[in-house]
Every structure is written in structure tokens, then in C-alpha cells.
Image: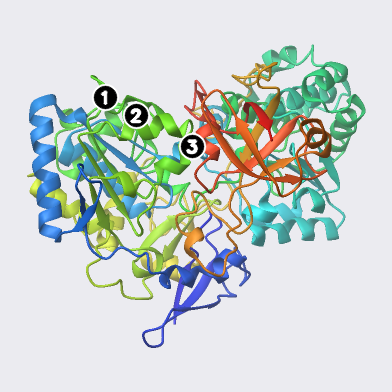
Amino acid sequence: MTTTHCPYCSLQCGMRVSKRGPGVPEISEWAEFPVNRGALCRKGWSAAGLYAGRERLTTPLLRDRATGEFRPIGWDEALDTIATRLLALTAERGPDTVGVFGGGGLTNEKAYQLGKFARVALGTSQIDYNGRWCMSSAASAGTRAFGLDRGLPFPLADVEGADVVVLVGSNLAETMPPAARHLDALRERGGRVVVIDPRRTATADRADVFVQPVPGSDLALALGVLHLLVAGGQVDEAYVAERTTGWDDVRASVGAWWPERVERVTGVPAGEVRALAALLGGADKVMVLTARGAEQHSTGSDTVLAWINVALALGMCGRPGAGYGCLTGQGNGQGGREHGQKSDQLPGYRMIDDPAAREHVARVWGIDADDLPGKGRSAYELLDALGTPTGPSALLVFGSNIVVSAPNATHVTSRLETLDLLVVADIVLSETAAIADIVLPVTQWAEETGTMTNLEGRVILRQQAVSPPPGVWSDLEVISGLASRLAAPIEFATDPEEIFDELGRASAGGKADYAGITYERIRDEHGVFWPCPTPSHPGTPRMFLDSFAHPDGRARFLAVDHRGPAEVPDSDYPVHLTTGRVLAQYQSGAQTRRVRDLPDTGPFVELHPMLAGRIGAVDGEPVTIATRRGSMSAPARVVTTIRPDTIFVPFHWVGANRLTNDALDPASRMPEFKVCAAVVTV
């Protein structure tokens, strides 16, 4: 029996996996792991079902472009073919003609090696990952406000110690159910939970206060709350003076956001805005947590900054049981953005345009810093450039199902189809793998060992519990095999512990410093919180207690204003479309849609009875949604829990992201997944 962690969300719940004979592995509780204490959601309990399907890839595949059919090939032929074509393309067009696209589910070791491979073996600047579409707005805001981005700067259990928790755009009862127990414990001791969401979700049903704004207006609501805190004399002036800068500009910027104006913009009655401000202003410990509902907007980073301003004005950040945090989504969404698979970063959360960072990482890698490429394109911009005269003509994809998960997905798919070479490493023939030239079968979850960093900044260890099927390689072996064929100037290891030790050296002195973390410590301590600069350092469960990460130790108030979505309803597209997750599915569904024990209902369209009556929609019957980018049809779900001016579609199936807007946040480069203008018809 092996202790390991769930293959899905950022909680990284602990579990035990046992394998007796040739059958499917068995999942059991690991009660000692502190994040979930043995609790798992249905996805976790059924995770072994990933091993029961017939769709598992066990040999490399080569697609005939003339017929579209795949034929199996050996590993040497696959890697030789890829390397030969990459060398020919780079000789003709330069190293940036090759792009690399990673994933927020890759282990830290894989993310680290992938960034190193791109910049050293390929020499390309064109690398980014799908986590750009998950937490980047919160990461950008946290870096600007606090000097450092760690999703939760405190353990998740600290939620129970708050007096009021405000969830902005989070449905954690469905997206990470074991975390919801902390809300229940908070309420049992008399605390209050506020949920802000255009839909009354399962999380809202557990709340004391539910606020239902128009999609894309969370920023305006935060401005209105801060206006009232100022007007009511509820700002912690001593804290603001001692621990922050920039307050005067922010105080002036919210002066015009009186409650009635907020009501006109957000649809939230002025009385509810006043009640929310009074609740926050009268509480001793307030915690504000944002998630994708607030962040996946072209104004997402400003929205997060607006809510951080509320937390700072109340004097909450850096206090136990209070402050601001981001509920990271993907399994390694935190670690995946720390160690080099983002276009602008090097390991340790160093910036690639920082000369000192380049020198440090180059020394660890054994190369000249001048040989490192510079900053590349962000995720969507990279995909949008594929096949263009100045963009990549080849793309290597690890741990991402772009065809389902990219915004404006029909356009992105057309860009993928223009490539001279598309290579996808995956466990199944996903929608993206199905259009690849070469598909590489790789290990999954309990077949491999590696670290992840959960939403708290706790570095944990997934341990191999079962053997992979014959013919399946790890991503680390793929990277090493390609690097050697590309005549990389350095060797690429395949042992995850050896790679993690190197990652520690590369991250040393950086913001995300893992230098003092080892596999042995992780096993002994049930995870170690970064930063942890030395073996004797205890790790950092709670950040900002004494100072923030800016050079002067102060947090930054940053003035922002409401701009609204990039696309608003009009006579042709009169309603708001928003997207999200459902309990039984995860991300693009490439894994969960193949697990028999998880219900696969397919996509649906959630709409209010008033809207349904107006267009003649009937519950269970098909309706068609159209936006300026595409259309899809799915059964209607007529519910009273959504705003009458809004429709909702889950994004786990092909369709939803054919509709979504690719407008980008100027700071984070986050696409506007969460709101666009749409029309729904029968």
C-alpha cells in the first residue's frame, strides 16, 4: 500500500493506493494527511477507474495526413522522426519556430525539465502552459500587491479561524468538495460565509449571505464595498500607515462608487451592498478568497487587486485567520507556474529578463547565460501565432487538451491544423492528440513519482504505486530522449528525485525557494511549505506575518477602476454567457469522461425560467447558443438559481470554448472565459 495524492485538483488530497494482482488498483483513505484527513470527493474515490479503460495509449502513433489514420510505431522511430523534423525546421527558420505547451497538472520535476528543455535543448523562447488560463490573474495581482504570489499564503485550515469568509467566483463545494468542511466548521463556531456568484451554486447553498452580480462586475462590487468602508470609518488606519503604501490614491479612486451606482452596474441591490460592507467592517477577522469566476476576465487581475484592497484596508493581510488568498485550480497550478514553463519565468519564480536570475540558473544548468532565450509569448498568443509567418511551425504539447480548453477553440484548432508538426504526449487519444502528427503514450498519476505544490504552497510527493503498461514512457524519459537526439549541450536526467534536487539548487534564493526541501522531508512532514531555503528551515506555512515581499516590506494598494467585459450584450447577442465546472468532471474531461463510475451527462445549457419562457425553451429539450465566435447545441436545464440575463455551460466537453472570448487581460494575459455576449434559441 502506497501513500500518494489525488490526480485532480489543487487540494492534492492524500490517499492510499494498493494493487493486488492484475486488476484495477484500490483507493483507501489516508487519514493522517492534514489537507483532507481521509476525505475524498467522488472523483478521488473513483480515480483508480483511470486504469480500467480500453482507451489507454500504449504505443507511439504516427498519423498519415492524407488519410488521417494512425499507425503504431516504435519509440526510436517516433523520437527520431520528431528530432529530425525539429532540426530541419530550426535550421531553416530558427529556434523560435518550435513551440512548447505544458500543463498545470505536470509534476514540478516535469515542469522544470520542460522549461529547461525548451530553452537549452531547443533554444526557443516559445513556451507557456495552460495554467496561464487558470490562476494567472491572481498571480499577477498578488505579485504586484504583496511582492510574491502564493495562492494561499496560509494553510487551508485557517479558514476555520476567520469570522467572515468571502468567496468571490468560487464553487468549491463542487470543484474541491473536501475543502467545504472548513466552511461548515467556520459556521458551526458562529462565523459567516459570503458567496458572490451569478449562479446559486452548491457552495452558495452553504452560505449565510449570497450576492448575485452580473457576470464581469465583481470589480465594481469591490469598489462599492471599499467606498462604504471608507465612509463608515471602518478602515484600519494604523495598519494602513504601518504596513502599506498607495492608500491615498485608492481611497480617492473609490469615492464615486456609492451603493446606487454599484447597483446600476452589478445588479446587486444597494441595500445588499451596504449590508455586505457592514458585515466586513464589523468583523474581527475577514478572509477574501477569489477563484476563476472572478479571475478569468480581461479585467481579472484588476478585480483581484480590488478585493485585495478591501482586505488591506481592513488590516487583514498577514494576520492569522484572515487576509487574501486565491483558490488555485489545477493539481499543480501553483508549482507549475514557479519553475520555468511560463514564457517569462525561470525556476524559483525568477523572471527571465532579470540578468542575475539568468546567471544563477545558467550556472546550475552548466550553460552560458547569454545562450538563454528571452521572454516568449503567453499561452493564447502562442497558439494564435501558430503557423503564421512569425510564429511557430511546430508544437510539442505535454499535459494539455488544447482543442477543448482553449478560448475561441475553433480558431485555435485551425491554428493547430496549420502546423508542420504537432506532437502530443498524453495517456489517451484526447481531442488534441487526435489531430496530432505523432502521439506519445506517457505515464499517469500513480505510475510515477514526483512532487506537486498544492493551493497552500505545500510541496507534496506523489509516489509510484503501480507499474505503467508495457510500452509507456514517462514525460521525463521523452524529454531526455528528445534532448539527446537534438544534441543538447547538457544531459537531461530522468530520475525525479535527482531532478528535484537540481530544482532546489536552481530555485535557491528565488521567491519560490525549494532549496531546503527533500523527498525525505516531504514524507516525514506530510509536505513542506515554501519558501524553505535550508534543510534546517521549518518551511513557511503562513506568509506576511511580519512583512510583505516588496523590498520595503510593505504591501501595495493599487488603484483600479471598473471597465466591464470586453464584450457586452446587445440586440443581436442579448444575454451573458458564463462557463464553469460540474461535480463529476474535471478540466477538459480527458480523464474523468473515461471513468465509468463518474456520471457523464454531456454538456447542457442552464437558463432561468423567465428566459426559457421568452424563447420557448423546454427543460431537457435542445437549445442552441451562438456567440460571435461559434455555436453549440445542448439540452436546456431550466433553473431558478441563475440570473435571468445569464446562461451557463460547463466546459468539460467540446463546445463551450468554441463560444468563449479570447480577449486578454493586459497584465496577466488571461482570456475572458467567464463572460461574453450570446444568444440562445430553440
Give the quarter of the image for residue 234.
top right
The amino acid sitting under disc 1 is Gly
The CA span between labels 1 and 2 is 8 Å
Front residue (pair 534, 290): 290
Per the image, the residue denoted by label 1 is: 391
The local secondary structure at tag 1 comes to loop
Name of the residue lying farthest toward the right: 271
Percent x, y of residue 21:
37, 88
The amino acid sitting under disc 3 is Trp
Marks 1,2: beta carbons within 8 A: yes
- Above or below, 151 relative to 46: above
The local secondary structure at tag 2 comes to helix
Mark 3 vs mark 1: give the one in front: 1
Crowd around label 1: few <14 · some 14–19 · many ≥20 (10 Å): many
The CA span between labels 3 and 1 is 20 Å
Give the quarter of the image for residue 311.
top right
Location of the C terminus by quadrant is: top right
Q: Which mark is residue 133?
A: 3
The amino acid sitting under disc 2 is Leu
- Of labels 1 and 2, earlier in sequence is 2
Tell me which residue sits at (66%, 55%) in the image.
174
Front residue (pair 495, 251): 495
Percent x, y of residue 73:
15, 59
Q: What is the image's colouring? A: rainbow
- Above or below, 466 relative to 114: below
The CA span between labels 3 and 2 is 13 Å
Q: Which mark is residue 337?
A: none
- Residue 351 visible to an observer of this rendering: no
Per the image, the residue denoted by label 2 is: 382
- Above or below, 457 relative to 51: above
Crowd around label 2: few <14 · some 14–19 · many ≥20 (10 Å): many
